[in-house]
Image (cartoon, helix red, strand yellow):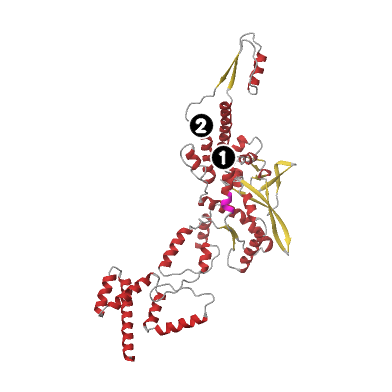
Amino acid sequence: MADANDTTAVASKTPPIGEIATVAKDITMPAYGGIMRSSDEVLAAKGAGRGLVIYDDLERDAWLYACMQKRKMAVISRPWTVEPASEKPRDKKAAERVNNQLAALDFDDACYHLLDATLKGYAVAEIMWAVKGGEIVAREIRPKNAHRFLFDDQGGLRLKTPSNTFQGEPVPDRKFLAHRFGAKDGNPHGLGLGQKLWWPVYFKRSGISFWLQFLEKFGAPTVLGKYQPGTNVDELEAALARIAHDAGVAIPEGAAIELIEAQRSGTGTQEQLIRYMDEQIGAAILNDGGAKGSGGELASSAILRNEVRLELVQADSDLLSITLADLARWITYYNDPSANPPRITRTIAEPEDLKIRAERDKILVDMGFKPTLAYIQEHYGGEWELSAPPPPIDPVGRKSAAPSAEPNADLSAEFAEAAAADATPIDPLTQAMSEQAAPAWAAVLDQVRAIVDRAESLEGLRDDLLAAYGDLDATELARVMALGFSVADLAGRYDCHTESNA
């Protein structure tokens, strides 16, 4: 009895399965004969039957085209990778297969065309399959005009044909990629930036037209002809037409001709309108709010600033990865259905500021660390090789001359004999101290040796060292004191050794 009650309770808690508010039932998305129509109001009002072609026309605007190029290039300039679904051998093999196929075709170019969806709402590309070496291969991804396609009320892609332009024909499975941008509420057409850009471009073009007319008025004033009743009007009009080309004209008697100069009042100009519309275009495409100002200020800031925000690049790349997941799934399905398809992604990150890294590396070097050659090449790029070591420092802190490429054997022998004759037991330790110390310590060593030479006792040596280096911190002062007493100790040992031999 308890089991039956439990079963009934579970059954009563089962949530509704399946979608109720489907696209087919959406009253805001008109569907005729099972074919969805775009909800883009600009296409409906201004398309005049041309459809997405009006958005192609937008790219004739140089500034809009440049902004769209910047946004697309910000994505495809990033490196792409194929990540296996897991560490299982089958999944890793599937990822390797997809990677090799993408590397063999112009993958970035295909992604560039799919990103047309950013402007139009959706973009379509056809996969050209082939059999190569016993493997099903995507040998090409061909971009197609999105205007040739439409969607049914289930979101399925259909191709318009000459014999069926209204409903189109269904396309085969795993044949066409459909990339969407701005798709809301399951709208298969998406909603591109063209809807937001159409009006700024329209106003900009209108402003340019008025601006050209205005400049024409300044260049050639309007000609006004006045005539009295009975005057031959045809002759007067002919005279007005000749004014633009001839130096002198003949007019009927009783007629008069005047030139009306163009005049302007107010602070607003067509140029400001055009620059403002460019600012709005840049804000919509690049997510750049632009700058406030007028004239040169807008030219130097709002229009010339064209960096794409990093989060915008990441969003475009993520949307593209969702579409490309279909391609990875299809390649895997045709070649190894038991494997999990990999994921195609792009690495989106801010370029590293090498100046900051260099400053940090310099601090580490000053602390006593040394970077490897591999580290330098990895982070700074370019061709590098280890430089020659600095010449050794002699006991008094002077840099020794570099050896000659072809030394004289006789002179070298004489020099070696002289050096051996003058050597003392202190010299080897002093030389070692000099080589191990930083160049800045060479001068310190000279001064310490001078203090040792004139010291009459260890207490006097201590006081002299404190007087000379008392301003150093405890660590560095300890090093100086240890160096001084070591030199004094060895000097005393040498004196004792010399007296006993005498």
Q: Any magenta on residue 200?
A: no
Is 7 on the left-hand or right-hand side of 421? right
Q: Which tag, 1 or 2, sits closer to the chain's start?
A: 1
- For the residue marked with disc 1, what is the amino acid? Leu
Q: Residue at x 47, y 40 (%)?
A: 297
Determine whether, in the image, residue 11 is placed left or right of residue 451. right
Binning the other alpha carbons within 10 Å of mark 1 as few (below 14), some (14 to 19) or many (20 upward) gives many
Q: Residues within 10 Å of mark 2 (few under 14, many from 20)?
A: few
Q: Is residue 155 visible?
A: no
- Determine whether 120 is above or below 5 in the image: above
What residue appears at the point 35 percent right and 73 percent down from the top-left corner?
446
The majority secondary structure of the magenta stretch comes to: helix
> Could you say whether the residue bearing mark 2 is in a helix, strand or loop?
loop
SS at mark 1 in the image: helix
Please give the residue where the numbered disc 1 appears in the rendered image. 197
Q: Is residue 159 visible?
A: yes
> Where residue 39 appears, x then y in whole percent?
59, 40
Among the 4 quarters of the image, the one containing residue 448:
bottom left
**Pointer 2: what residue?**
269
From the viewer's side, name the closer residue of 488 and 123.
Answer: 488
Real-space CA distance between mark 1 and mark 2, rounded to the nearest whole angstrom: 22 Å
Magenta-tinted stretch: 72-76
Q: Quadrant of the C terminus?
A: bottom left
